[in-house]
Amino acid sequence: MKRSWPENSPSKPRKAIEELVQGRQFANQLRGLLGKSIGDDGSAPEKDLVLKILSSFTNTLSLLNSAESDVDVDVSQVQPNTQASSPCWDAPKSESSGESCRSNSTVKDRRGCYKRRKTSLTVTKETPTLIDDGHAWRKYGQKPILNAKYPRHYYRCTHKYDQGCQAAKQVQRIQEDPVMHRTIYIGNHTCRTFQNVPELILDSSPNDSPFVLSFDDTFTNKHNHPFLSSSFQSVVKQEHREEMPAAADDITHNNQSSSSDYLVSPDQTALESFYNSMPVLSSSPMESDNGNVISGILVGSADFTDDDLLFEF
DNA sequence: ACCATTTGACCACC
DNA sequence: GGTGGTCAAATGGT
């Protein structure tokens, strides 16, 4: 599950990680200073630049650190034959969703009765700030994670039941850098209710990547990956898919489209090649005055508990 | 009253 | 059996 460094060179990557962590902490300190003097809207070019630096650090760290990540979702976890084994995820409330559930149990006894979705479409992001991603999330759980300093928070889409939206996310503060939060987006939004989310059109031109996005007329540089375009968003770590027809929930933006309208290709190989070929991180210089726009697309961490907010600045 | 969060309990997976 | 993911009652906020 977790990747590890080659046995013959275990120390160098770790040293690199340490250096990167330190660099990222320095960048965070600088960002804090800038934040105090500039404001918190993220629109200042200085702050934007710092965020990009942070993103670079985080990205590199994430690549190096994936083997140690406590929320690691490795591509190797993809288990195609588990696609149909997630009834509780798709319809967790339904009585029929838990085949393994005790049939005669009371309502209270049905707690935790579900089929855990082992693998699914997931996108891991690390964000230096807690920015509303435009979706409405409801927290449904919090768990302390073994060997992790900070608990993991579980969120589901607010419209899970009224619209059947399957999107969920897990948020956990990164141990090495508590300012950063690692958000794992699971599944894609099928709800139509969005706040502050701009128009986002997936360009499915056949000659290019089927996942190219265009952000209306304010965001047209197609070489930037949708996940990676924000100066706030730091890392798209890994992704794999299972039964979800679309790519990341946040890039679909189906507020104006039904689930069948997803423009992201469901083809897994295309998806993989897309993510393999894309640059690890690219920070768009174009979104600086549209921070809210981009954050609504790319950055998770909408709802946080008090301890999360302690680190907000 | 309604909605969101908290939190202990339950259960699947390893 | 341990860990992590989810449920749902209890609680709090508006």
Image (spheres, coloured by chain):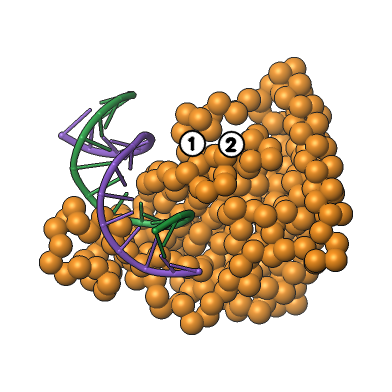
Chain colours: A orange, B purple, C green
Identify the chain of the residue marked 1, using the numbered disc in the image: A
Image-based side of A302 in relation to C8, left or right: right
In the image, residue A23 sits, relative to residue A93, either above or below, namely above
The part of the image, by quadrant, that contains residue A220 is bottom right
Residue drawn at the location 77% of the way across and 41% of the way down: A21
- Do tag 2 and tag 1 residues touch (Cβ < 8 Å)? yes
Mark 2 residue element: loop
Mark yes or no: residue A263 visible: no
Spot occupied by residue A216 in the image (x, y as percentages of width and height): 65, 53
Q: Position of residue A222 (x, y in %)?
A: 75, 60
Residue carrying label 1: A304
Give the residue pinned by disc 2. A130
For the N terminus of chain A, the quadrant is: bottom right
Q: Nearer the viewer, residue A274 or A252?
A: A274
Amino acid beneath label 2: Leu
Pick whichever, A76 or A161, lies toward us.
A76
Residue at x 69%, y 31% (from the top left corner) = A42
Q: Residue at x 17, y 56 (%)?
A: A107
**Residue pushed farthest top?**
A37
